[in-house]
Image: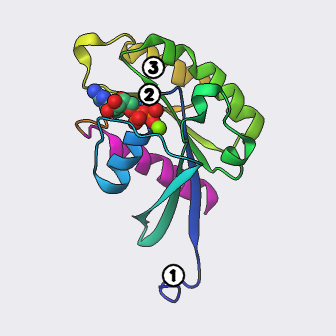
């Protein structure tokens, strides 16, 4: 309750960006509901889910925004980014073109968000080792160059999904409080 927290409220907006079909929606559904969908269903309008995480005995709410497929048309609006404390820039380790797009997504983030925004590069679909197209090293190197946190994840088998979101949330909490 508010009383327990001395009236303090922690609500952090976090955005998911990256090319179409890299697994953004499934990362969110895995984190928020422990669900995975094989068929990505197109939704209308911007959607977010709120997830509560406990840090230092405090309830921290992460409001995680997912695109509704508008990234396909390079039409993610400034409203989507507005007020974001954190961003997960997602690519698919089995499709190099999605890794090549990361720089463009970072440019867009730079236009819409301030430099304090906590950013994590996420190489999703690490379960697809047999058709890997981007090495772990390349992901790490790009993250280091650009000053991003880095993690490989799988929304399918759950690898690092909670870890990735929680790291970003904790980092925001540490910066803000
Ligand atoms: P989005 O367009 O970035 O939101 O991507 P989606 O979450 O809709 O996922 C696109 C496709 O990739 C779907 O067919 C998912 O089932 C699949 N997918 C998502 N995450 C993973 C993953 O971690 N591993 C594998 N193998 N497939 C995934
Ligand atoms: Mg989606």
Earlier along the polypeptide chain: callout 3 or callout 2? 2
For the residues marked 3 and 1, what is the alpha-carbon distance in whole angstroms?
Answer: 39 Å
Q: Which residue is mark 2?
A: 21
Q: Which residue is mark 1?
A: 5
For the residues marked 1 and 2, what is the alpha-carbon distance in whole angstroms?
Answer: 39 Å
What residue span does the magenta drawing correspond to? 158-177
Earlier along the polypeptide chain: callout 1 or callout 2? 1
Q: Disc number at residue 75?
A: none
Mark 3 CB near ligand 1 (8 Å cut): no
The residue carrying pointer 3 sits among few (fewer than 14), some (14 to 19) or many (20 or more) residues within 10 Å by Cα, namely some
Residue 117: percent from left, percent from top: 65, 44
The residue shown at (41%, 72%) is: 57
- Tell me if 65 is positioned left or right of 40 in this view: right
Mark 2 CB near ligand 1 (8 Å cut): yes
Which mark's residue is nearer the viewer, 1 or 2? 2
What kind of secondary structure does the magenta stretch mostly adopt?
Answer: helix
Label 3, secondary structure: give it.
helix
Q: Which residue is mark 3?
A: 139
């Amino acid at each position: 309750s508010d009383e327990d927290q001395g009236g303090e409220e922690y609500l952090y907006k976090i955005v998911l960006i990256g090319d179409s079909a890299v697994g953004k929606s499934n990362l969110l559904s895995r984190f928020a509901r422990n669900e995975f969908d094989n068929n990505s269903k197109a939704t209308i309008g911007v959607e977010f889910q709120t997830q509560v995480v406990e840090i230092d005995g405090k309830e921290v709410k992460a409001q995680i925004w997912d695109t509704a497929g508008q990234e396909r048309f390079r039409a993610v609006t400034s409203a989507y980014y507005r007020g974001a404390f954190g961003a997960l820039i997602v690519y698919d380790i089995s499709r190099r073109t999605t890794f090549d797009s990361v720089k463009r997504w970072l440019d867009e983030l730079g236009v819409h968000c301030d430099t304090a925004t906590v950013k994590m590069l996420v190489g999703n679909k690490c379960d697809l080792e047999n058709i890997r197209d981007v090495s772990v090293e390349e992901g790490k190197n790009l993250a280091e160059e650009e000053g991003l946190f880095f993690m490989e994840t799988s929304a399918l088998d759950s690898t690092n999904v909670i870890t990735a979101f929680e790291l970003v949330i904790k980092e925001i909490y540490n910066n803000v409080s």
